Image: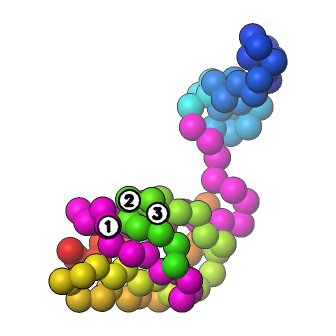
Amino acid sequence: MRPFGYYGFYDPWFWGPYGYGGPYGGYGYSMPAGMGKVKIQTQLKDAEVFIDGAYAGTTSQTKDMFLKSGAHDIEVRSAGHPKYAERVYVLSGKTLKISPGF
């Protein structure tokens, strides 16, 4: 097995979710060390997302985000809906699901 495909490019099917040749033979990728995943679950695709006061993008762009483990302030804003704001604690290697309710 080689880490590069037929044309000399990186071959993600070879590397797999756990690094070099992982146990599942190459589906997806692993979570970065010291980071956790935050999933925003909402039907609104154009709501603005702010993390620790900084604009992160819209909900369609930031549906799944990797953040450093620790406390973070997350806000979701959309015209015609009340602002959703919550302080969350992200754990390394874990996924936190957030449902703003709109």
Marks 2/1: CA–CA distance? 7 Å
Question: Looking at the image, is mark 1 or mark 3 nearer the viewer?
Answer: 1
Q: Does the magenta stretch include residue 44?
A: yes
- Graded by Cα atoms within 10 Å as few (under 14), some (14 to 19) or many (20 or more), the crowding at tag 1 reads some
- 32 in relation to 81, above or below: above
From which residue to which does the magenta span run?
28-54
Q: Does the magenta stretch include residue 80?
A: no
What is the x, y in percent for residue 35? 65, 65
Left or right relative to 59: residue 35: right
Is label 2 in a helix, a strand or a loop?
A: loop
What is the x, y in percent for residue 60? 38, 59
Compare marks 2 and 1 and give the one earlier in the sequence. Answer: 1
Residue 95 visible from this viewpoint: no
Residue shown at the point (66%, 29%) measured from the top left = 12
Left or right relative to 82: residue 11: right
Compare marks 1 and 3 and give the one earlier in the sequence. Answer: 1
Is label 3 in a helix, a strand or a loop?
A: loop
Q: Mark 3 points at which residue?
A: 62
Residue contact at pointers 1 and 3, CB within 8 angstroms: no
Q: What residue type is labelled 1?
A: Asp
Marks 3/2: CA–CA distance? 6 Å
Residue contact at pointers 2 and 1, CB within 8 angstroms: yes
Q: Mark 1 points at which residue?
A: 46
Q: What residue type is labelled 2?
A: Ser
Marks 1/3: CA–CA distance? 11 Å
Q: Name the residue under label 2.
A: 60
Q: Which of 41 and 22 is in front in this view?
A: 41
Residue shown at the point (75%, 11%) measured from the top left = 6
